[in-house]
Image (spheres, grey):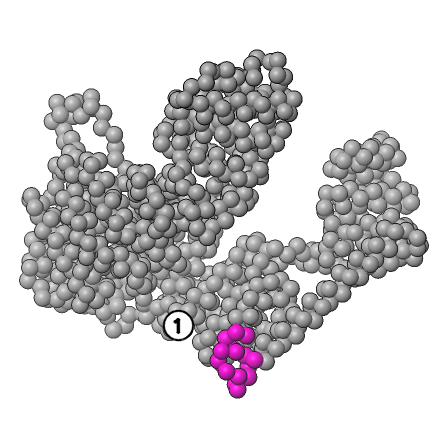
Amino acid sequence: MEDPLQLKENGNECFQKEDYDKAIEYYTKAIQLTKDKKVIAVLYRNRAASHLKKENYVPAASDASRAIDVDASDIKALYRRSQALEKLGKLDQAFKDVQRCATMEPKNKTFQETLRRLNHDIQDKLKIQFSTDSRVERMFEVLLDEDIDKERKEKAANNLIVLSREDAGAERIFQNNGLNLLMQLIETKKPEMMISAIRTLSGMCSRHKSRAIAVLHFVGLDKICSLMALDNEEIALAVSSLFQTILDNFEGVDSKEHRGKDEALVLDTSKDVKMIITHLLEMLTHKHVSGHGRDQALNLLIRNVPRKDLGIKDNTKSLDTIDIGLKKILKVGGQIPELPNCLPLTENTCLTASILLNNLYNDLRGDEERATFRKICEGYITSKFDPHNMEKNLHAIQCVSALLQGPFDVGNSILALQGVMEMMVALCGSEREIDQLVAIEAIIHAASKASRANFIISNGITLLKDIYKKSTIEKIKIRALVGLCKLGSAGGTDYGLRQFSEGSTEKLAKQCRKWLCNQNIDIRTRKWAIEGMAYLTLDADVKDDFVEDEPAMQAMFELSKSADKTILYAVASILVNCTNSYDVKEKIPELVELAKLSKQHVPEDHPKDKKDFVMLRIKRLIKVGVVSALAVMLKADSAILTDQTKELMARVFLALVEDVRDRGKIVAQGGGKTLLPLAIHGTDIGKTKASHALAKIAAVADPEIAFPGERVQERFVAEGNDRLKLLVLLCGEDDVKVQRAAAGAVAMLTASRKELCHKMTRVTAQWLEILQRLCIHDNMEVQHRGLVIAFNLMEADVEIAKKLIESELLEVLTVIGKLENNVKNQDIINIARECLVKAMDYSLIKPTSQSGI
């Protein structure tokens, strides 16, 4: 059996060696093995000292208290507890402990100094609390006084919001009857007062779980939902933000460490989360919920139900939502604004419902779960088919459209059900406007698969042509045109697979551009012209004509800034088509010849899809303001701005920065700042494309100019992001242009901040290998950037320099440093020599070594 006293001595030795984890381990074993109270008290006191060194203040205070319980006059334990309590913000208790220490040793200068400091801190804290209490009280007095002018009230409301975002301010509002007073502001029914109160509640909940729970239960879920249901977009957004703040806290985003009694309190919020989701689902089909409220309920479900990381096994929230809410979501997706019983909607509601359906379906883990999803959808839609009730039939077809825009596989399986496609084509021939509207839209969405397009071409294309030619109703005519556009683009970019005769697509596109530029047509109808162009611009003749039509381009950009966000994907698709930034499969000549011999179809490239034509289109787009338009599109606070749309935008940006001469214009129009979020959020492909574009901009522009208003270096220094890692990995790419750009960015960053030099060595295990590859690169620009990075790292820290000199890099530096001076690569020779001189300064190599310097 181990000796407790020996364990204590072992712990003391480890403490002296600053191995505090090991010391804690020895003290803990000794405490478990001894029964001598005095020895136990000393062990607790010592363990408290170890916890203090590790900045673990809660266990430090607890251990010191246990030592004091044995001996109330243990001056070391009292002082250690005082230190821990001070760090925990419990200044009053810390002051009492050190006061007892000073009473026992009145001449101890450390105790006297600590007393003075704590007394000063306590007075400051009291002043702040008093000041905050007074400010809170005055603000509520101003806000609730009917006789005070509007300007003073707005100022008080803004001050209250700002105060609520500080932890001390939020706590004072909470402690000073703030929730009751905020509810009084809400009950005034004045929108500006209501918004201020809701934003203040959101600030109070921010990063503080217990306050978030208190606010949720005090205000009540029904009340919060009723506020979000109001027909006021700003109020709906404010309540949505409050809901999101609460849910973020429930997922663990809580800045406050709960200690003492709080530590023992288990804040179980799983039931609250489930109730919030249930209430949001109930809002979807409630007829008294506004369109804005319904949009925000959908957005909250999209953000909080499907898993953000599919590596997490638990998808219970999605399964529960499908179980109790899938039919409700389908009902929203199947709404038709033109029908009298339609729920209140915005332009974005139905598409947002489709996105939620898609995200839920993608969150399912296996065939069984997906089969259940499809079964519910099929059952819901087939139950709506009724030969005696045309409104129900229309709702069913609209639901199919919603699924085709969301989980396409589910929508496609429903199209295969007997009679569904036939009904869609039959409705096109109806004399009723609404029947034609719904049917044509469904056909447009159904024609995404070649097999479906062929079915419609053979069964309904004549019908669509007749509708387009004969209809005098703009809504019908434009949709029929888009249907024809989509069917005409079924061959994609393959010049040899065009569905229509030569010149037909150009005629359709010309008509689309006319609709697009017609200011007398309502926005909802004009957006369909953009949908048509999204298909037709797969044709090189069409995209070439489109970029030359400045009024049409400007009209598209203006529409992309409107409240109707359903247009974002179509606009991004057009820009991808015009810049040819879609993926193109490489043609292997041997396989092409083999295909020709076997009489198989070989994809043909359009002459206007060659690089010269593409670059001319890109320059035209930059000239007419495409960068500014993309910046506005990216600011859309809507689930409709999907990761797929962001990927398209990233592809466009990468194409725009291809020519180094255009990068200055792109930076001037805000392209650098717009690219940053695209490089951080979205699909893996999208983030990579945006990072490539960023690297290219960074290679030729000062970061402070390229990314105005951004603390660029701080963003790279901050922990918890992969910005620097992305750049380092891009330095290892095979594409020389990307390497040159990324290495230039890393060279600038490592020159600006030592922290970034240290961080570079931690972001990836491949950093040294990548750096060595840069330093021996065939391209002199890349090689120079690599050597600059090496010098920056060596200058930043002797330990990093030691790693570099102990690697194969020393040999590289030596070989380059010994080269004869010459104009062509003198910069490279000079920087290699500077690296070797720095190594000598650190005494890592000797002047007489093989360096020859």
> Residue at (78%, 61%) from the top-left corner?
120
Q: Name the residue carrying label 1.
A: 232
- Which residue type does callout 1 highlight? Asn
Residue 796: name its quadrant: top right
- The answer to whether residue 84 is above or below residue 329 is above
In magenta segment, residue 143 = yes
> Residue at (6%, 44%) from the top-left corner?
501
Q: Which of the two residues, 850 or 354, is positioned nearer the viewer here? A: 850
Percent coordinates x, y for residue 95 in the rendering? 82, 59
Q: Residue furthest bottom?
A: 147
- The answer to whether residue 276 is above or below residue 693 is below
Q: Quadrant of the N terminus?
A: top right
Main SS, magenta residues: helix
Residue 834 in sight in this render: yes
Secondary structure at badge 1 equals: loop
Name the side, left or right, on which 741 lies relative to 58. left
Percent coordinates x, y for residue 87 in the rendering? 73, 53
Q: Dot 1: few (<14), some (14–19), or many (≥20) neighbours within 10 Å?
A: some
Percent coordinates x, y for residue 255 in the rendering? 61, 55
> Residue at (28%, 70%) from the top-left corner?
342
Name the side, left or right, on which 75 lies relative to 743. right
Q: Which residues are magenta?
A: 142-156
- The answer to whether residue 133 is above or below residue 835 is below
> Residue at (52%, 36%) from the top-left corner?
750
In magenta segment, residue 462 = no
Q: Which of the two residues, 40 or 235, is positioned nearer the viewer here? A: 235
Q: Which of the two residues, 737 or 186, is positioned nearer the viewer here? A: 737
Percent coordinates x, y for residue 503 in the rendering? 7, 46
